[in-house]
Image (cartoon, rainbow, N blue to C red):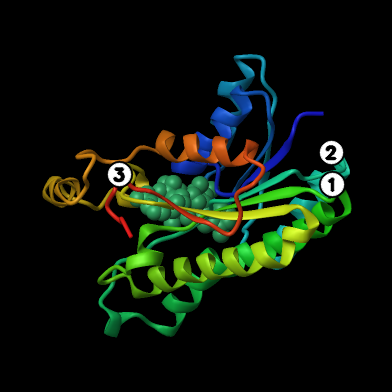
Amino acid sequence: MNKVIIVTGASRGIGRNIAYNLAINGYTVIANYNNSEQEALKLKDELKEQGIEIDIFKANVSKRSEVEKLVDFVIKKYNKIDVLINNAGIAQSKLFLDITDEDFEQMLKNNLYSVFYTSQETIKYMIKEHKGSIINISSMYGKIGASCEVHYSVSKAGIDGMTKALAKELGPSNIRVNSIAPGAIDTDMNKNLTEEDWKKLIEETPLTRKGYPIDITRCVKWLIEDEFTTGQIISVDGGIVIS
Ligand code: NAP
């Protein structure tokens, strides 16, 4: 059987592009979504028109019980999980002093606890197979921090910490764990950016353009087939972060 791959947050943006392209390339894809059922159904239908079947599965990955249901569904249907792509995430722009306890908790629940839950629920099956790969979508702001996005930056830095520590713990079980840290990508998440904001971001970017979901998908595809890279935070940002 082809590699079985879970993509979280696959109804829109980067996750949708990843799910679509992996399916086109012959992988067995389970596309998770939460609120955007119509978009998820549209993804499934678009692929079906090309003769490709994928599963779509509603689960709020910030809740352990829903992650359990997602993983149960995949194991019952396919009996294995080869790759977990932790893409689901939210963003919020607020001055630090305006961030409420609830904002902070929601950010960590959606962006970091979700990765903790999906990884724990999935790894037990990867260990049985003595192979697997986890690809976390973090952010350049986990590395360099973003003004007015402290809680977002904390959640992404947390993902990078988990990536490094887990890679060490799971390496002997032949499970690789890596993060991709995107720069500014043209998706709904950035729909509040003005032309002027984009212009400034592009000026800071050595490759002098905005990023698109396909830029992230290309790196995901490489990481899926790679066999000797683990514990890395890979910047896919047009060169904004060079360290
Ligand atoms: P987006 O267009 O806003 O899409 C977010 C996706 O995540 C949606 O499919 C949404 O699903 C899903 N999602 C959010 N919370 C969820 C939850 N609790 N359970 C299940 N699904 C959930 O965002 P994007 O730009 O594609 O971002 C994808 C990832 O890349 C995020 O982790 C983001 O932090 C990261 N990233 C993005 C950028 C950027 O510039 N866009 C840069 C760096 C990193 P529903 O709509 O179905 O709820």
Of circles 3 and 1, which is in front?
Answer: 3
Q: Which residue is mark 2?
A: 78
Q: Which residue is mark 1?
A: 75
Q: Is residue 224 left or right of residue 111?
A: right
Q: Position of residue 50 (x, y in %)?
A: 61, 14
Q: Quadrant of residue 3?
A: top right
Mark 3, secondary structure of its residue: loop
Residue 92 visible in rendering: no
* Labelled disc at residue 238: 3
Comparing 88 with 221, the one in front is 221
Q: Is mark 3 within 8 Å of ligand 1?
A: no
In which quadrant is the C terminus drawn? bottom left
In the displayed structure, 152 sits above or below 53; it is below
Q: Is mark 2 within 8 Å of ligand 1?
A: no
Mark 2, secondary structure of its residue: helix
What crowding class fits label 1: few (fewer than 14 Cα within 10 Å), some (14-19), or many (20 or more)? Answer: some
Q: Is residue 104 left or right of residue 183?
A: right
Of circles 2 and 3, which is in front?
Answer: 3
Q: Is residue 168 left or right of residue 197?
A: right
